[in-house]
Image (spheres, coloured by chain):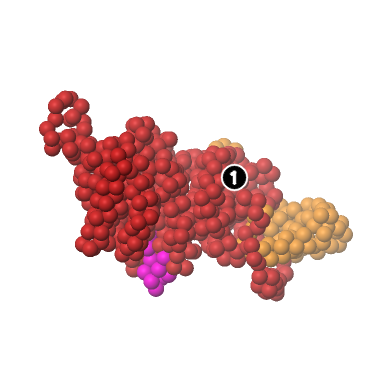
Chain colours: A red, B orange
């Protein structure tokens, strides 16, 4: 990391000159009780809610509960060394994290301290981790797509830059895989990514970081991790820290993607913190403000008007359901806050449909306006055809002989399901998606056996790359299928089909 | 926080208040002479307008100066604290180790 020594010198000189050498008279508190990462203190008469407090031994806490005769302090980190009678002093500051480009490629904890053994983070810019979300006037409508590279999503649940899209599903249904694939697909797209891991196993976080390194996605990504072994207060702070890092880039005019993996564990961490602070429990023992906890976090995503910086923060919160129960407290909360959800199903996953996206329950409430014209045109019939197929498929199980029309719909549906399947870590470029969807909706796949669809796809791509790369270039550059371009695609696909028949 | 113990503590504090007494702990790097202690006590008496119950402890790790803990107020001009403050201001914004 390049550090400008002159700048560092000037900063230190400034601080030394400003240093106040007078005797300090300060308000302090005395710890009267400590346990479970919570300290109760008497004194601290003028303390502010959310203020950072420092203990005698250097431990840090946040004033969470201001009560009549004591202050509830949540410790950030280990409580050893904090005893009854320990002094607490005010810092006059709120929790802040370093922000800016120095964080790219780094793995940090909830306080922005590096945990990747790559040395200190050389950033002089800090932001408070809590902030009020941008107001109505500062926001702009969402009209630029964020390409995930996942065909099923880009076609059926399109996502725009600045959108909040929930990824929901049971455990082991590929929620994190979607998030990681989306990050990988931002390579070269100019979108900065932040992956916030809350309450995850450290081994899981390590494997995500390794994957991002492997696919050269770490250079534009920051990982904020508060693992399962960290105290609930750190897990509670992590998403807000990640969001503060994202906001800095957003106000700088950059597009940012932030993934909160996952908010159910975040809610659980907040619940244990709240219960230990003796705040009254509500439904499922969550405190009354658990909705506000997530709404104020997710409201900070969005797209800014040019005069306010002009960037965007796209948020992918992840929520884990238990046995597909979307009606539980946290899932319903987050569904109502976000602009849509991607619903992943265990059955689909197990039957080999991966990503296991349920097209019926997955929606995107704002992404449609942001879709590229080519994609909107070509994917419109896809959704309905797929829905028809699912309906027919459940009927067809009961009857042996089906009429021609039903048979063709069924076989068409099977092929659509097939082209929406996708390997992990292999995001599709835009022009590939358009091409394969075009081939499917225009019935070019009818002659291809279902099990050969993947092979057909590979061959078509190869063919286009070798003989019609101009068509691919035009799809990518124009993002619209003009009648002329449509004719060229059709002709190329026909000549490919002819070539294939000759081979046989 | 409720409970008998706390109420008892409250009562005790109220009693001390009513008696107009204040418990003061003084930490010094070097031993204070009796005259110095008397001067300090009278100063604190003027400052807090209370009867001062002062205990003095010697702590060489403070390097110099005094640290006075009076109720919920701390008066600190020790060299140790100033160095810590200096360190903190150089790493402005990074208050954690």
Q: Residue at x 30, y 52 (%)?
A: A435
Location of mark 1 (residue): A39
Q: Residue at x 16, y 25 (%)?
A: A400
Secondary structure at badge 1 equals: strand
Left of A483 or right of it: where is A59?
A: right
A114 relative to A328, above or below: below
Q: Was residue B13 drawn as part of the magenta stretch in this picture?
A: no
Instruction: State which quadrant residue A404 falls in.
Output: top left
Q: Is residue A279 visible?
A: no
Q: Nearer the viewer, residue A395 or A449?
A: A449
A385 relative to B96, above or below: above
| Quadrant position of the C terminus of chain A in the picture | top left
Q: Which residues are magenta?
A: A298-311
Q: Was residue A301 drawn as part of the magenta stretch in this picture?
A: yes
Are there few (<14), some (14-19), or many (20+) residues within 10 Å of tag 1? many
Q: Residue at x 71, y 52 (%)?
A: B23
Subunit that carries the residue with mark 1: A
Q: Nearer the viewer, residue A105 or B82?
A: A105
Q: Is residue A213 visible?
A: yes
Q: Which x, y percent locates residue B78?
A: 77, 61
Q: Which x, y percent locates residue A139?
A: 35, 65
| Quadrant position of the N terminus of chain A in the picture | bottom right
């Amino acid at each position: 990391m390049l550090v400008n020594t002159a700048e560092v010198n000037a900063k230190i000189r400034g601080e030394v000159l400003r240093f106040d050498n007078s005797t300090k008279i300060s308000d302090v508190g005395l710890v009267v009780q400590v346990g479970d990462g919570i300290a109760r203190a008497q004194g601290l008469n003028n303390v502010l809610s959310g203020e950072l407090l420092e203990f005698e031994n250097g431990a840090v806490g946040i004033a969470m509960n201001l009560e009549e005769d004591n202050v509830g302090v949540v410790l950030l980190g280990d409580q050893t060394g904090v005893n009854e009678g320990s002094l607490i002093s005010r810092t006059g500051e709120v929790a802040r994290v370093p922000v800016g480009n120095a964080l790219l490629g780094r793995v940090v904890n909830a306080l922005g301290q590096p945990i990747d053994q790559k040395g200190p983070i050389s950033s002089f810019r800090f932001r408070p981790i809590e902030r009020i979300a941008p107001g109505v006037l500062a926001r702009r409508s969402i009209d630029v797509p964020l390409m995930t590279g996942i065909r099923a999503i880009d076609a059926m649940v399109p996502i725009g830059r600045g959108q909040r899209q929930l990824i929901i599903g049971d455990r082991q249904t590929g929620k994190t895989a979607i998030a990681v694939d989306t990050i990988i697909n931002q390579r070269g797209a100019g979108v900065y990514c932040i992956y916030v891991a809350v309450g995850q196993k450290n081994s899981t976080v390590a494997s995500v970081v390794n994957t991002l390194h492997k696919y050269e996605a770490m250079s534009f990504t920051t990982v904020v991790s508060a693992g399962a072994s960290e105290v609930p207060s750190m897990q509670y702070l992590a998403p807000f820290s990640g969001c503060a890092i994202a906001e800095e880039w957003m106000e700088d005019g950059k597009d940012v993607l932030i993934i909160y993996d996952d908010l159910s564990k975040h809610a659980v961490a907040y619940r244990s913190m709240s219960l230990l602070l003796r705040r009254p429990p509500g439904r499922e023992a969550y405190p009354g403000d658990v909705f506000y906890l997530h709404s104020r976090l997710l409201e900070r995503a969005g797209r800014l008007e040019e005069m306010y910086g002009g960037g965007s923060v796209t948020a992918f919160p992840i929520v884990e359901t238990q046995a597909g129960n979307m009606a539980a407290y946290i899932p319903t909360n987050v569904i109502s806050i976000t602009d849509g959800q991607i619903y992943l199903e265990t059955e689909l996953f197990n039957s080999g449909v991966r990503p296991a996206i349920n097209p019926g329950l997955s929606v995107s409430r704002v992404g449609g306006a942001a879709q590229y014209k080519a994609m909107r045109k070509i994917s419109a019939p896809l959704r309905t055809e797929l829905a028809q197929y699912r309906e027919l498929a459940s009927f067809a199980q009961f009857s042996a002989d089906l009429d021609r029309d039903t048979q063709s719909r069924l076989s068409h549906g099977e092929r659509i399901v097939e082209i929406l399947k996708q390997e992990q870590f292999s995001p599709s470029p835009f022009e590939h998606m358009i091409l394969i969807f075009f081939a499917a909706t225009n019935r070019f796949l009818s002659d291809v056996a279902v099990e050969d669809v993947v092979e057909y796809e590979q061959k078509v791509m190869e063919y286009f790359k070798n003989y019609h790369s101009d068509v691919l270039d035009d799809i990518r550059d124009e993002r619209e299928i003009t009648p002329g371009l449509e004719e060229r695609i059709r002709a190329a696909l026909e000549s490919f089909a002819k070539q294939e028949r000759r081979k046989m | 926080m409720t409970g008998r113990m706390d109420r008892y503590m409250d009562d005790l504090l109220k009693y001390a208040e009513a008696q107009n007494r204040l418990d003061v702990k003084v930490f010094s790097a070097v031993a204070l002479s009796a005259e110095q202690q008397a001067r300090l006590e009278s100063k604190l008496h003027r400052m807090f307008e209370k009867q001062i119950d002062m205990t003095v402890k010697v702590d060489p790790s403070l390097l110099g100066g005094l640290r006075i803990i009076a109720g919920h107020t701390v008066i600190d001009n020790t060299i140790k604290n100033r160095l810590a403050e200096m360190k903190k201001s150089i790493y402005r914004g990074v208050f954690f180790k």
